[in-house]
Amino acid sequence: MKKSCEPKVTTDCNLRQFVGYNMKRAFLTVREDLASVLEPIGLRMTSFSALAVIVENPDISQSRLAEALHIERSGVVVLVDELERAEFIERGRVEGDRRQYALRATPIGEAKWAEAEKAVHAHEDGLFADLTDEERASLKSLLGRVGRK
Amino acid sequence: MKKSCEPKVTTDCNLRQFVGYNMKRAFLTVREDLASVLEPIGLRMTSFSALAVIVENPDISQSRLAEALHIERSGVVVLVDELERAEFIERGRVEGDRRQYALRATPIGEAKWAEAEKAVHAHEDGLFADLTDEERASLKSLLGRVGRK
DNA sequence: TATTGTTATACTCTATAACTATA
DNA sequence: TATAGTTATAGAGTATAACAATA
């Protein structure tokens, strides 16, 4: 039996000692804010990522896009459908191979990408306002080095 | 129309310029490895987190646990059911308030926590092997400062 | 046989809302 | 009325597997 009046304070040192837990919490914070930023622009996190890669790699195929995003080809179909329906990209044909598509951003899609890129920069300026420019660059760099063997 | 022979290389500078994308990728890497480490121990990421908080805060209630983990109370029920079924924790009663439970780790649960804590440290030693101790501490610290206004 | 894109399906994680019992 | 816990449900996000068209 335990006395009532549960204290409202709870410690989580057992979790905070791990980098991974801090990463999870930070990522969920970023994800929530990012979703709210992208929504009025007509993008989700995943379609934003897909558009980013397509803009940077004109005529990329869906399989190559799947590799770049580290998701399955079946998942790409949904994303590409979504972006094509919004007229941000189009499925071009490839000369000499009728199996694959050549994905390209439309002029609308290019403009949408520019708009989204700017909005996401602003979103990060807000979320990382507590960090100096050096700390922010350091965080990005350190994250990019996780998991390499 | 586009010539065939899609190059296998794909750039993702449009995404890598953002801290958030690097964080997502790093987190997914961590999560995948962590899940494989916890599975043989009989824990999932979420039940690991719940056990961590219960061990550190004996007699915590489910509502308070939900706050600590930043999840809904309904989600806690599932986690606590799972940990109780495994006999890692027990639902004690609270003197003076029959609505709430006082969650405590059993001796089995304490031992399980010690085992898991050690395993997760080893998992992080592997995942962050490319970082110096200072860089790893810096990463953890920087992540802990994300999103504060 | 292998690859590209597709569909259907299922699984995980989590949130919402309605409910009960207690306070 | 408010709180603690519970249940049912639904929505993302993603993975798996089987398939048709093409190479």
Image (cartoon, coloured by chain):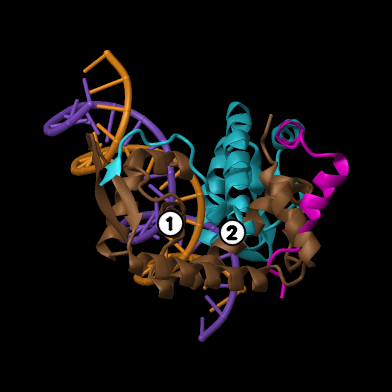
Chain colours: A brown, B cyan, C orange, D purple
Helix, strand or loop for disc 2: helix
Q: Identify the image quadrant of residue B124.
A: top right
Which corner quadrant holds the N terminus of chain A?
Answer: bottom right
In front: label 2 or label 1: 1
- Residue B132 magenta-highlighted: yes
Please name the residue shown 42% across and 53% down the image: A50
Q: Nearer the viewer, residue B47 or D21?
A: D21
Please name the residue shown 42% across and 75% down the image: A40
Label 1 sits on what residue type?
Answer: Val
What range of the chain is rendered magenta? Answer: B124-149
Residue at which label 1 appears: A55
Q: Is residue B18 visible?
A: yes
Where residue A83 appears, as percent x and y from the top left, is: 32, 59
Residue at which label 2 appears: A28
Q: Tag 2: Cα neighbours inside 10 Å, few (<14), some, or many (≥20)? A: few
Labels 2 & 1 near each other (Cβ < 8 A): no
Q: Chain of mark 2?
A: A
Q: Nearer the viewer, residue C10 or D16?
A: D16
Q: Nearer the viewer, residue B25 or A109?
A: A109
Where residue B53 appears, as percent x and y from the top left, is: 71, 51
Please name the residue shown 41% across and 69% down the image: A112
Q: Identify the image quadrant of residue B101.
A: bottom right
Where residue B29 appears, as percent x and y from the top left, is: 60, 39
